Amino acid sequence: MALYRDQGIVLRTYKLGETDRIVHLLTQGRGKVRAVAKGVRRPGSRFGGRLEPFSHVDLQFYEGRNLDIVNQAELITPFATVRSDWALSACGSTMVEGADRVAQEDERSNRLFLLLLDGLRTLAAAPQFPAVVLDAYLLRLVSLAGYHPYFDACSSCGAPGAHGVFSIAAGGALCRRCAPPGASVLDPASRALLMALLGADWAVLGATAVEPRTRRAAGALVHSFLTYHLGKPLRAWDLVPR
Ligand SMILES: [Zn+2]
């Protein structure tokens, strides 16, 4: 069996048999990898608690026919603070569920890997508004998946400007001429926040001081946008306190 090494982030785990687990990882070099960690649920397992969701690990695998087998796992960052706090954990769970949805097996996506790592690192710093960090991650995730939303030009005709209508189906803001009847209004505060979610530095996102109403409206819009373009809602999103 061929042996390979990669770093990855644990997306989710399932029990397998009496003592094993199936682990879904987002790796840097091979996209999504599904692997078996043998004996991981036995006390004193050599993997210890290293293969928990959110853990950033350096791994060695044996290539298998269906599932690969984890041979070694060394922790790079455990992100234990994200696991132990209820709100951070809800945000982190939504992040890994989103990555699991978008990532493909055997398809390298370094940008997706780094996006998830940035998102988890920002959560681990215990931001004031973790849901804003999550919304930024989700909006960038949909953009990476090929549905980049435009907020500074009309998504239909390209006319630049701070347009006041948003259409999920059209993929962003629309000018007055292109807006269909009954399209949802995009108020200036929500538009500014959405632009920050897409482009601002991670460090400032978690302390973005905006009205709670605007935060919730932008968050709901991000999730509707994601659900429309990726096909179905993320289950963990409902657990995020807002
Ligand atoms: Zn237009």
Image (spheres, grey):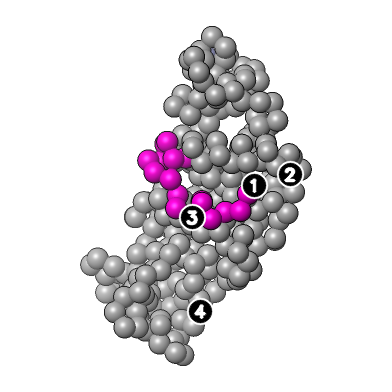
Q: Position of residue 205 (x, y in %)?
A: 69, 46
Residue shown at 66% from the left, 26% from the top? 187
**Distance between the alpha carbons at the discs numbered 1 and 2:** 8 Å
| Quadrant where the image shows the N terminus | bottom left
How many badges with numbers are in the image? 4
Q: Nearer the viewer, residue 21 or 165?
A: 165
Of the two numbered discs 3 and 2 on the same chain, state the one appearing first in sequence.
2
Residue beneath disc 3:
236
Residue 36 quadrant: bottom left
**Distance between the alpha carbons at the discs numbered 3 and 2:** 23 Å
Residue shown at 46% from the left, 24% from the top? 170
Q: Are marks 1 and 4 in contact (CB under 8 Å)?
A: no
Residue 220 quadrant: top right
Residue shown at 54% from the left, 74% from the top? 75
Element type at marker 4?
Answer: loop
Of the two numbered discs 4 and 3 on the same chain, state the one appearing first in sequence.
4
Q: Nearer the viewer, mark 2 or mark 4?
A: 2
Q: Are marks 1 and 2 in contact (CB under 8 Å)?
A: yes
The amino acid at mark 1 is: Val
Of the two numbered discs 2 and 4 on the same chain, state the one appearing first in sequence.
4
From the viewer's perspective, is 73 left or right of 128? left
Which mark, residue 208? 2
Which mark, residue 198? none
Element type at marker 1?
Answer: helix
Q: Position of residue 79 (x, y in %)?
A: 60, 67
Q: Position of residue 207 (x, y in %)?
A: 74, 49
Can residue 3 be seen at all in this image of the molecule? Answer: no
Element type at marker 2?
Answer: loop
Residue beneath disc 1:
132
What crowding class fits label 2: few (fewer than 14 Cα within 10 Å), some (14-19), or many (20 or more)?
Answer: some
Residue shown at 63% from the left, 41% from the top? 216
